[in-house]
């Protein structure tokens, strides 16, 4: 390991003397001999900085990214434009190295932007409170379900089959260890079957979970779902949303949702090959003391100056473990800051413009791709920026053909839904141009 670790022989001798040991082998004497390496690690000789940089660039060059391909893939992570101001601000040392605010009096800057983030998310979703924050959408859905069932003191969760498959898997794992029952609600033509929901509602249900726009891009009827949910005493409706869609759609809080969660990646967070991302959560006041993570509040210090505090923290690091509502630890602080800068930079008009351009371009793409009749809509539902198409061609062959033309195609729905084996889910954001959509159509017609 010598070429890779900068300790000199003198450094090692000094450390061993401090520990009262004679050798490195004595330091690791507790490790059984049968699991130790006898010949050392088979590592290449040390390389210079120039050689390492060249090698890593060669490795990176083997990847094909959205800078090399036109992206029509979504399914939970989206190629939205990221304003240049975001990288400029978050690269400042005081932001880039900030960590979770254990000592609030020394973390005023971090607490300030967490407070602003909470305010923005609560306003965007139409809810009373927001926390800061969660790991991703799947964790947000699962934590919201635990919170809702805890407040309701009930043991069953209903979740629509139109919710993102990965999120449903996360929920099932959380529910299993909490001895909660998860029942799936059937779908009809790409949206939640409300008749099936009504039939499955009972006094044991503490939470109903839907996603709108859902995994297929279709817009669910949140208001009717809320009405059905609230017929059962103390049952709460959890709605997972795309925050960009709220630039043009009604806020879930205004439609009867009790808890709103979602994935904040589209708020300026890079795709980054799958993460880290940003789960957000907002809720009605009655859930406040069961909300995971922390809530930052604004107050005044002894000199009358505005200051920020951890108003509520239910994490086991802050309070007795048996009273903690969650073991969520470090919040996604840097991504929270990114989302805050994104929302403030765009403002209400900018967010509406992104949402409008995304939905208009998605509807143009749907029309263009289906006009010949070779590809057909899988569902007949209002949609936001994603839609599913089916055809007589093999979905994997279609995606391979698109890849050959430097187009990152959609998501093969057959991976998660066996009944949609030949269907592909396409996503269109404000970044896509008419020429790119027309090329997608042309290539698809030629496959």
Image (spheres, rainbow, N blue to C red):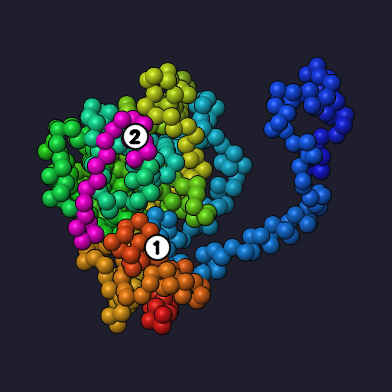
Please tell me whether mark 2 sits on a helix, a strand or a loop.
helix
SS class of the residue under badge 1? Answer: strand
User: Which residue: 64% across, 64% down?
Assistant: 61
Task: Please provide percent x and percent y for residue 79.
Answer: 45, 61
The circle on residue 176 is: 2
Q: Looking at the rendering, in which quadrant would you find the N terminus?
A: top right
Residue at the spot of label 1: 411
Q: Position of residue 135 (x, y in %)?
A: 44, 41
Measured as percent of width and height from the top left, residue 334 is found at: 51, 43
Please tell me which residue lies in front, 398 or 19: 398
Q: Which mark is residue 98?
A: none
Locate residue 370 relative to residue 16 in the image: left or right: left
* Residue 312 belongs to magenta span: no
- Residue 207 image-quadrant placement: top left
Left or right position of 212 against 65: left
User: Residue 181 colored magenta?
Assistant: yes
Question: Camera-side residue: 164 or 28?
Answer: 28
Residues packed near mark 2 inside 10 Å, few (<14), some (14 to 19) or many (20 plus):
few
Question: In the image, is residue 47 above or below residue 181?
Answer: below
Q: Furthest residue to the front?
A: 34
Seen in the image, is 84 located left or right of residue 423? right
Q: Is residue 417 visible?
A: yes
Segment tinted magenta in the rendering: 172-192
Residue 362, position in %: x, y?
33, 68
Q: Mark 2–mark 1 contact, CB under 8 Å?
A: no
Tell me, yes or no, if residue 15 can be seen here: no
132 to 310, vertically: above or below: below
Camera-nearest label, 2 or 1: 2
Does 339 appear above or below 308? below
């Amino acid at each position: 390991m010598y070429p890779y670790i900068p300790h000199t022989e003198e450094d090692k001798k000094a450390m061993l003397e401090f520990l009262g040991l004679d050798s490195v082998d004595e330091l690791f004497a507790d490790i059984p001999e049968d699991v130790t390496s006898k010949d050392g690690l088979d590592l290449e000789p040390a390389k210079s900085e120039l050689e390492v940089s060249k090698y890593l660039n060669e490795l990176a060059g083997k990847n094909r990214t959205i800078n090399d391909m036109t992206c029509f893939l979504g399914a939970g992570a989206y190629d939205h434009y990221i304003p240049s101001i975001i990288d400029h601000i978050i690269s400042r040392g005081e932001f880039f190295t900030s960590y979770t605010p254990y000592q609030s009096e020394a973390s005023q800057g971090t607490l300030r932007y967490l407070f602003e983030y909470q305010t923005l998310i609560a306003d965007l979703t139409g809810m009373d409170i927001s926390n800061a924050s969660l790991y991703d959408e799947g964790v947000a859905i699962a934590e919201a379900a635990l919170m809702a069932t805890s407040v309701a003191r009930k043991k069953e969760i209903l979740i629509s089959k139109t919710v993102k498959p990965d999120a449903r898997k996360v929920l099932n794992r959380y529910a299993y260890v909490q001895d909660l029952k998860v029942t799936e609600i059937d779908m009809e033509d790409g949206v939640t079957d409300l008749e099936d929901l009504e039939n499955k509602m009972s006094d044991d249900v503490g939470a109903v979970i839907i996603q709108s726009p859902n995994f297929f891009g279709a817009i669910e009827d949140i208001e009717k779902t809320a009405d059905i949910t609230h017929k059962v005493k103390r049952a709460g409706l959890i709605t997972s949303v795309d925050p960009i869609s709220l630039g043009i759609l009604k806020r879930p809080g205004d439609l009867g949702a009790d808890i709103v969660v979602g994935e904040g990646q589209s708020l300026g967070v890079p795709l980054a090959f799958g993460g880290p991302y940003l789960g957000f959560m907002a809720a009605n006041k009655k859930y406040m003391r069961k909300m995971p993570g922390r809530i930052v509040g604004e107050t005044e210090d002894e000199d009358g100056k505005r200051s920020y505090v951890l108003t509520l923290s239910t994490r086991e690091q802050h309070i007795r473990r048996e009273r903690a509502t969650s073991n969520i630890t470090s919040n996604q602080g840097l991504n929270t800051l990114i989302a805050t800068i994104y929302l403030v930079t765009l403002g209400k008009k900018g967010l509406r413009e992104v949402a409008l351009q995304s939905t208009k371009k998605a509807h143009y793409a749907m029309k263009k791709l289906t006009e010949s009749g070779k590809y057909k809509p899988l569902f007949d539902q209002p949609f936001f920026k994603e839609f599913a198409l089916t055809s007589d061609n093999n979905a994997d062959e279609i995606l391979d053909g698109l890849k050959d033309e430097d187009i990152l195609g959609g998501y093969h729905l057959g991976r998660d839904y066996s009944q949609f084996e030949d269907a592909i889910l396409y996503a269109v954001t404000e970044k896509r141009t008419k020429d790119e959509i027309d090329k997608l159509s042309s290539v698809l017609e030629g496959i």
